[in-house]
Image (cartoon, rainbow, N blue to C red):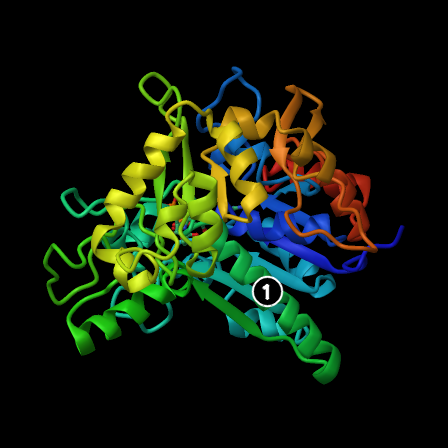
Amino acid sequence: MTKPLDGIKIIDFTHVQAGPACTQMLAWFGADVIKVERPGAGDVTRSQLRDIPNVDALYFTMLNSNKRSLTLDTKKPEGKEVLERLVRESDVLVENFGPGALDRMGFSWERLKELNPKMIVASVKGFSDGHHYDDLKVYENVAQCAGGAASTTGFWDGPPTISAAALGDSNTGMHLAIGILTALIGRAKTGKGQKVAVSMQDSVLNLCRVKLRDQQRLERVGYLEEYPQYPHGTFSDVVPRGGNAGGGGQPGWVLKCKGWETDPNAYIYFTVQGHAWEPICRALGKPEWINDPAYMTAEARQPHIFEIFATIEAWLADKTKFEAVDILRKFDIPCAPVLTMKELADDPSLRASGTIVEVPHKERGTYLTVGSPIKFSELKPEVTASPLLGEHTEDVLAGLGYTKQQIFNLREVKAV
Ligand code: COA
């Protein structure tokens, strides 16, 4: 089957998570992604958090599937020459080095454009160009703090909190993938490449857009009615942490189910959707609440929303999280069990849809990973193993026209 990105050649000069997540997705969709790595070491995630000695860590294998690996020391003249040839033949170069690293290597945007005017150069940095912090190196949690997620996540009586979701890393990679695809469509019209830059701070803030909404509402009216602080607590002049509150127009909370005393994940998320109030009352066996003025409107319910949640928890006390959701789904109530990584890994629906996939790997045997979360009618992205360090060096060099002797010479000077 031909894939939409067949024929697109990508130099994957990325490491850790933000860049690799982007290029991995493009590889699933058919691009030829050549991961350029430092000889002898490679991407630092190959050796970080290893679970099997001397075998590529899951951190690496789960972010670098479907790629080829070329080792190249791009600080040596011989390595630079190989990279120049590769640039002339490629469509996209993706990088997420620290600020200025690509320029110091001699591959500024101007130089890359000179080598290949059709080249799309895509970068992830912690902060955008010209930002007063644009010299900073940034990892995931730094970005979550800088992008507004940490100050608005957690409980009001605790410190700013980091989300387990990779809002700074993979999320930025997804933004970059959209940027690259947009630039490719643009190039098809103009024949010209361009620079695509995404900052981790901006990508986090983009996902925290509703909190900027709340900041403006708070400044106008002095309170936020969907937050647990309303109406009994106090608000300052900044958006507070709202615990597990809904965040939109529908109040919700994480509620205890049977077994919560011993199982830290025996919970469901329950949403009190306004127009579903009647089915909620019926599901809970509380028909008297349907027309009770103290309960019948969202406004009336809000002052005692935690008393309502406590009543729901009493109803949940003899039901597991799965039993509860099976009952509530019949009443069209938006809810879900709080699922653990173990439950997700074993979920037959996720296996069937290709969201959780098993991948055979030359050295580690089979491992689990998350496959494409995007489903197409005409494409079934297949996940293949991540490459070993330098596994495709010879292939890639031969494809660039290097002879066996020249490849040997490059090896002698440790440029590949
Ligand atoms: N051959 C020779 N040198 C290479 C190379 C290769 N194949 N690949 C990388 N290098 C060099 C770079 O030229 C650079 O050298 P220099 O600093 O002497 O100019 C160095 O290796 C890499 O530097 P850097 O990217 O700054 O690595 P780091 O480990 O110090 O920092 C990050 C890691 C992630 C903090 C940093 O890369 C960063 O802030 N990136 C941008 C934001 C980002 O993506 N964050 C991580 C998200 S998961």
Disc 1 target residue: 178
- Residue 309 relative to residue 381: left or right: left
Q: Relative to 408, does residue 282 appear above or below in the rendering?
A: below
In percent of width and height, residue 205 lies at: 36, 63
In percent of width and height, residue 157 lies at: 13, 44
In percent of width and height, residue 397 lies at: 75, 46
- Residue 222 relative to residue 327: left or right: left
Q: Relative to 299, does residue 391 appear above or below in the rendering?
A: above
Residue at the far right: name it. 1
| Viewer-nearest residue: 116 or 364 | 364
User: What residue appears at the point 57 percent right and 40 percent down from the top-left corner?
Assistant: 63
- Residue 275 relative to residue 237: left or right: right
In percent of width and height, residue 406 lies at: 75, 43
| Viewer-nearest residue: 105 or 380 | 380
| Viewer-nearest residue: 66 or 287 | 287
User: What residue appears at the point 61 percent right and 33 percent down from the top-left corner?
Assistant: 369
Q: How many marks?
A: 1
* Residue 345 falls in image quadrant: top right
Q: Residues within 10 Å of mark 1 (few under 14, many from 20)?
A: some
- Residue kind at label 1, given as amino acid type: Ile
Say whether residue 161 is visible: no
Q: Relative to 210, does residue 358 appear above or below in the rendering?
A: above
* Residue 48 falls in image quadrant: top left
Q: Relative to 60, does residue 318 appear above or below in the rendering?
A: above
Say whether residue 405 is visible: yes
Specify whether tag 1 is near ligand 1 (CB below 8 Å).
Answer: no
Q: In which quadrant is the C terminus drawn?
A: top right
| Viewer-nearest residue: 196 or 236 | 236
- Give the SS element for disc 1: helix
